[in-house]
Amino acid sequence: MPADSYETARQAQRRAVARRRSHPRPPGPARGPARTAAGEPPAGSPTQRQGRAAEARAARHLQAHGIRILAANLRCRAGEIDLAAREGDLLLFIEVRERRNPSFGGAAASVNRAKQARLIRAARHFLPRLVRLHFGGVAPACRFDVVAFDTDQPRWIRDAFRA
């Protein structure tokens, strides 16, 4: 790209910054996710409520099997980790999927290569923080699991894919 294109881009960025400074946003409600009176996120769409319910059921199922849940719904630009957990010295990144209609291969089949790549990128983003907070700074072995709900019963797929 020629140098003049970079200069054109720089000038456009300067104009945008100047516009923001000359027209500040009016004061309004605090930024960030909305909360209800109880401090919980709003109910959301039916699909979001179904997803949160599936994640809660998956967490209960994993805890019943001795898994310690470290975090839930870790979001970054790369993607989202539904559950981060610890099993002994292993750090688990867990994707929770629910499908009511098995026409397209079911819940586990919906974790395709593209979804796996997003999960791996998100895991790499959160790995340093999880290691520092829960493993004393010593990087553990990691595993990607899937908890799939095709019926009301969870199917826990250990080591579903590898980074």
Image (spheres, helix red, strand yellow):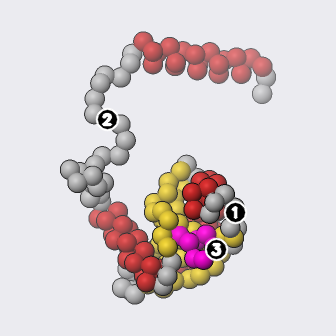
Depth check: give the residue in front, 134 or 82. Answer: 134
Disc 1 or 3, which lies upstream in sequence? Answer: 3
Residue placed under numbered mark 1 in the picture: 139
Note whether 72 is above or below 159 in the view shown.
above
Note whether 124 is above or below 140 in the view shown.
above
Report which quarter residue 50 is drawn in.
Answer: bottom left
Residue placed under numbered mark 3 in the picture: 89
Q: Residue 72 in the image: x percent, y percent?
A: 45, 63
Report which quarter residue 92 is drawn in.
Answer: bottom right
Disc 2 or 1, which lies upstream in sequence? Answer: 2
- Can residue 110 be seen? no
Task: Give the amino acid at mark 2.
Answer: Ala
Q: How crowded is mark 2: few (under 14 residues within 10 Å), some or many (20 or more)?
A: few
Q: Residue 144 in the image: x percent, y percent?
A: 61, 72
Task: Give the amino acid at mark 3.
Answer: Asp
In-image side of 143 versus 106 (left or right): right
Q: Quadrant of the C terminus?
A: bottom right
Note whether 99 is above or below 131 in the view shown.
below
Report which quarter residue 111 is drawn in.
Answer: bottom right
Q: State the extent of the magenta-drawn residues as a range.
A: 85-92
Q: Which residue is found at the position 46% from the left and 73% from the top?
A: 97
